[in-house]
Amino acid sequence: MFARGILKSVGLAIALMSAGAGYAQQSQNYIRYDRFESERSDKLTGGHIEKGEFEAGQPDIQLTLNVPSFRLTLWQNGREVKSYFIGVGMKDYPIYIGEREAHEIIWNPPWIPPASDWVKSHKGVKPGEVIEASDPRNPLGKLKIPLGDGYLIHQATGPSNLGNLVSHGCVRMLRSDLYDLAEKIVAARSLPVTRKQIASAKAGTKTLSVALDEPLEFDINYDTLVVEGGVLYIYPDVYDRRTNTVARLRDELRTSGVDPSSLDDAELEKLLAAVTRRTKFVVPVESIRQGRALADGHSEPLIGSPARKRPAVRGRRAANAGR
């Protein structure tokens, strides 16, 4: 579980001592209901996420994913090494929320279609058939990381998959990101596979499987209201689980040390309404304390960096710009 992995490494005991009994109670609640709390929440990190450079030969690694943010993160020794934007399962085939484990990495994986309704609708594909990596009917791409019970991390069909509900319960990543993640896992765990073997698998279609010495923990959560680094992030409720409500927003603020009593329901509803399927709403908690939540808050793209505003042009430049 993420709480017993990364949080131990970042010094949970220190955070508990500095924050007092209230934080300890929140931490206990997290351990009990971790699938609904973002791993990036200030309630768990103490308000600071330490970043670090990847180190080969350091096997203490974990993966986390907060589904509404479409962000998968690799952690090593309690530090954030790298985050990747991903696609996840459609509403009718949602990704599993909870803890999974990876036991192997497979380059050029064959695909065995499951006996599911969505497979039956695919022409030329039969449940139980072994479809090799070189077959264009194989949707897995160049690499997969099985998570058990048919759940996978595998290659996306393209950039349009990122930030979208596109799969039948699996995590999809761009090929370059998937290669990067797999090779970091190999290097961290010192797995018995050479660079030459990996390069050959990338260039060809022969299947290459590498078992992990110990399971790689993957914590998948669903949290649309996150206070991270002193900033409130409101993400879209992509699975329509009714998580973006006034009551839940008040509770998130209160348990994050922000008194929401000065905010009326109408103002909180405006914050929640500012979120769209493609955007998140972002506002510093200090602005909320000062009664400037709406004035200082703004929308940002759900994935990627915020678009930079162009400075206004005047006079002749403005006239020329309109041609």
Image (cartoon, helix red, strand yellow):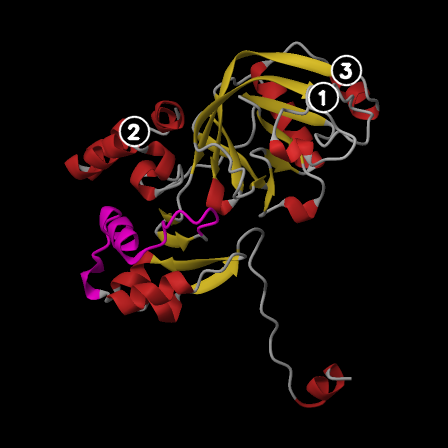
Q: Which mark is residue 31?
A: 2
139 left or right of 13 in image: right
Report which residue position mark 1 lands on.
Answer: 109
Q: Are marks 2 and 1 in contact (CB under 8 Å)?
A: no
- Residue 267 location, quadrant: bottom left
Residue at image coords 64%, 35% = 118
* Image coordinates for residue 133, horizontal then vertical, percent: 78, 24
Residue picked out by circle 3: 197
- Quarter of the image for residue 272 reads bottom left
Upstream in sequence: badge 2 or badge 3: 2
C-beta proximity under 8 Å, tags 3 and 1: no
Q: Nearer the viewer, residue 190 or 267?
A: 267
Left or right: 303 in relation to 217: right
Would residue 263 appear left or right of 163 to someone viewing this image? left
Q: Amino acid at mark 1?
A: Pro
Q: Residue 282: horizontal and vertical position, in percent?
A: 42, 58
Q: CA distance from mark 2 to mark 1?
A: 35 Å
Whether residue 14 is situated above or below residue 48 in the rendered picture: above
Looking at the image, tell me whether mark 2 or mark 1 is earlier in sequence order.
2
From which residue to which does the magenta span run?
237-262
Report the residue at 22% width, 59% height from top. 260
Badge 2 crowding class, 10 Å Cα cut-off, few under 14, some 14 to 19, many 20 or more, is some
Q: Is residue 291 visible?
A: no
Identify which amino acid the numbered label 2 is placed on: Ile
